[in-house]
Amino acid sequence: MSLLTYVQNGLTAVSKEISETKYPEIVFPQFVYVDQQAAVGITEKLHYGADEHGSLDDGLITTGTSTLDQVEVGFTPTRSYIVPWAKSVTWTTPELEQGKLLGLALDTAKIMALNKNAQQTLQKVAFLGHAKDTRLTGLLNNKSVEVYNIKGTAANTKVQAMDFDKSVAFFKEIFLQGMEKTKRIEAPNTFAIDSLDLAHLALTQRNNTDTTALEFLTKSLSAAAGREVAIKALPSNFGTRVTSGKTRAMVYVNSKEYVIFDVPMSPTVLASQQKRLISL
């Protein structure tokens, strides 16, 4: 058996493990809808949002009706860019020869590290885009996200500096603003905030009670929305890497009608090949 076959057999054996491995810190599917409905090789995709216009005070039919009133539906496209991505790992000839000689399975630590890097890259792009292709933007820096400036008592105050009352005022104001953006048709169901801000809410108690700001907000906002509302911690330091505009919290409707992340192909292992060093 050649060394190349030895490597390929090891990669085949680890492919299932790669597809089943979950990393607790990879949480982007909780914040965006991951759409895999695209063929490999597509470079961009259009998502269409419907804009409906129709009066609620017409449509009646009488004996003199000769035409029907219409509901106008327009479609606004949003372009999503899809780019190829690949990385590699290398095994040296001596380490492969030793493993083969001893009858050991291929050491897959390198390929698992590569898989983790791929998942981390997807997560970073989902929230912040890619530094080397500015067409790719994420949840925190997409230009379609509107910046709202707080006007109430929590204006110009960092979340970690808010007491219980200011925390409630802050989240109430941006929640109601989110409802206005949908013309009060649908209430937001997700807040995305920095992990330290979430910890602050969980540790800030109402005076003379053991109720925390996080508990109170989760319960009251869910009641206002008529469905579960979640306040979620952004992974890593992503919440602090946006330096203008959306710096304290994001509120949105977390569904495929509003937030989509196109990932046509999950991370997978490609074929192995031999590298040769030639000296002249």
Image: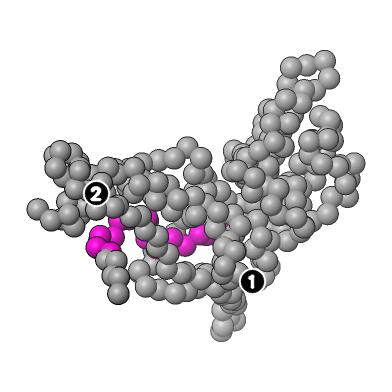
Quadrant in which the C terminus appears: bottom left
Q: Which residue is farthest front?
A: 280
Residue 257 against residue 108 in the figure, above or below: below
Q: Can residue 28 be seen here?
A: yes
Q: Quadrant of residue 23?
A: top left
Determine if the magenta segment contains residue 53. no
Residue 70 against residue 237 in the figure, above or below: below
Q: Which label belongs to residue 54?
A: 1
Foreground label between 2 and 1: 2
Q: Dot 2 corresponds to which residue?
A: 94
Q: Mark 1: which secondary structure?
A: loop
> Residue at the location (52% across, 69% down)?
80
Q: Indicate left or right for 17 with 122 as reference.
A: left
Q: Mark 2: which secondary structure?
A: helix
Identify the amino acid type marked 1. Answer: Gly
Q: Earlier in the sequence, mark 2 or mark 1?
A: 1
Q: Quadrant of residue 194?
A: top right
